[in-house]
Image (spheres, grey):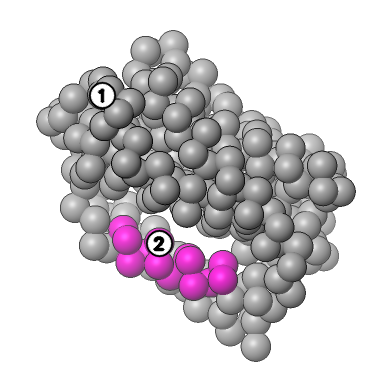
Amino acid sequence: MLAEWLSLPAGILIASVVSAVGIGGGILWMPFLLLLMKLNKETAILTSLLIQVAGMGSASIAFWWRRQVEIPLVLFLLLAAVPGLVAGAVLAVMLSMENLQIVLGTLTLATAFLFVSSGQGYTDTGVERIELKTAMPYGWAVTGIAVASGMLSVSMGEWLIPLLRGKLSLKMNVAVATSIAAIFGTCVVAASIHLAMGAQADLSILMWAVPGVLLGGQIGPRINEKINDRKLKEVFVFALTLVGIHMLYNAY
């Protein structure tokens, strides 16, 4: 196992990358914790969730102060996510480490494909508020997405943004803010579920990773302002593809 202090630069790097492209960090934290830090799956999942609680909590407060979060929609998304989070936590206990890595590797590659195929632009088109009855038909989709969060600590943001933009027609800034607030809530709920099921986090890694995440979350938006958005996504897709292939290879 690598020294725990390496979680600090890892936190800075991961948070910088994911905040620059606008997603959650679980998709990268899990490979780091499983493959490099050699944590068992229960400890890795809970540690990843708690790291994201810190990072997403900070971002959620910032967006809330800007009044960009659609709070009723966040509450609906959380309510719809709870069954999926519980199911995911149960599946995480049932799956072997090898099968968990296969699922994580497959999901990582699927996320890379989603980034390649998605045409969501950072434009001002769309609405700032919607009625909850408009979102209710998609509650089942949120429940399904949440299974991955409960099982692998993977953020729902990669899949929520296309839903909020494409199906609900929210403006991009509102969609991102609402997604991040929903991710924060799901991480809190999922972490509570795993704690109730007896999982324990690695506190030494948390001590180093949380400051790195908070710092990286401030660096990412600055990177986004200076580097072409398409180039950022190309680098991110390349990194996700390598991680996904390595996870699948390591599982056999």
Give the residues in magenta: 103-115
Give the image location of residue 110, x and y in percent: 40, 67
Give the residue at mark 2.
111
| Quadrant in which residue 103 is drawn | bottom right
| Residue 117 relative to residue 186: left or right | left
Q: Secondary structure at mark 1?
A: loop
Query: Mark 1 sits on what residue?
Result: 130
Q: How many marks?
A: 2
Where on the picture, by quarter, is residue 239? bottom left
Foreground mark, 2 or 1? Answer: 1
Image point (21%, 44%), residue name:
166
Q: Is residue 214 above or below residue 96?
A: above
CA neighbours of label 1 inside 10 A, class few (<14), some (14 to 19), many (20+): some
Q: Earlier in the sequence, mark 2 or mark 1?
A: 2
In the image, residue 112 sits, relative to residue 185, either above or below, namely below
Residue at 37% over, 13% down:
67
Q: Amino acid at mark 2?
A: Thr
Residue 96 horizontal/vertical position (percent): 74, 74
Relative image position of residue 241 (x, y in whole percent): 43, 71
Q: Nearer the viewer, residue 31 or 132?
A: 132
Q: Secondary structure at mark 2?
A: helix
Main SS, magenta region, reads: helix
Q: Could you tell me which residue is drawn at 44 percent across and 16 percent down?
A: 64
- For the N terminus, give its image quadrant: bottom right
Numbered badge on residue 62: none
Can the viewer see residue 208? Answer: no
